[in-house]
Image: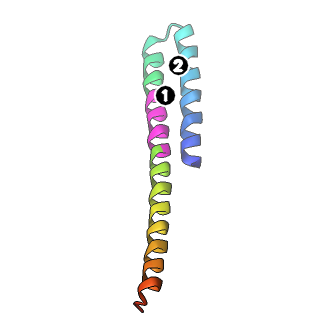
């Protein structure tokens, strides 16, 4: 969702900053920024995976509820 998009944007920003630092021969800063960019990218992937899994779970719950309703109608159960 929107959090993942923000994380991706932050990763790109930090990667660009790392490239600038590398160009200035600021190796420690470049390495730190590159690590932060990698962490932001990993977070974006995790959030995207979570959002997709949540959507699948929601769809499955809805399908299960629909199936249960159909079964109850067909058996005449009045739960």
Q: Secondary structure at mark 1?
A: helix
Q: Which residue is mark 2?
A: 18
Q: Residue at x 47, y 55 (%)?
A: 56
| Between 39 and 79, the one nearer to me in the picture | 79
Q: Which residues are magenta?
A: 36-48
Q: Would you identify the image quadrant in which residue 74 lies?
A: bottom left
Q: Which residue is mark 1?
A: 37
Q: Residue at x 58, y 15 (%)?
A: 20
Q: Residue at x 49, y 32 (%)?
A: 41
Above or below residue 52? Residue 21 is above
Q: Residue at x 50, y 61 (%)?
A: 59
Report x, y in % for residue 61. 45, 66
Above or below residue 1? Residue 66 is below
Q: Secondary structure at mark 2?
A: helix
Which mark, residue 47? none
| Between 24 and 67, the one nearer to me in the picture | 67
């Amino acid at each position: 969702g929107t959090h993942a998009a923000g994380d991706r944007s932050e990763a790109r920003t930090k990667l660009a900053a790392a490239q600038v630092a590398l160009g200035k021969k600021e190796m420690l800063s470049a390495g730190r920024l590159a690590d932060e960019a990698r962490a932001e990218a990993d977070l974006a992937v995790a959030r995207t995976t979570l959002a997709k899994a949540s959507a699948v779970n929601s769809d499955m719950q809805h399908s299960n509820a629909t199936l249960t309703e159909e079964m109850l109608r067909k058996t005449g159960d009045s739960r």
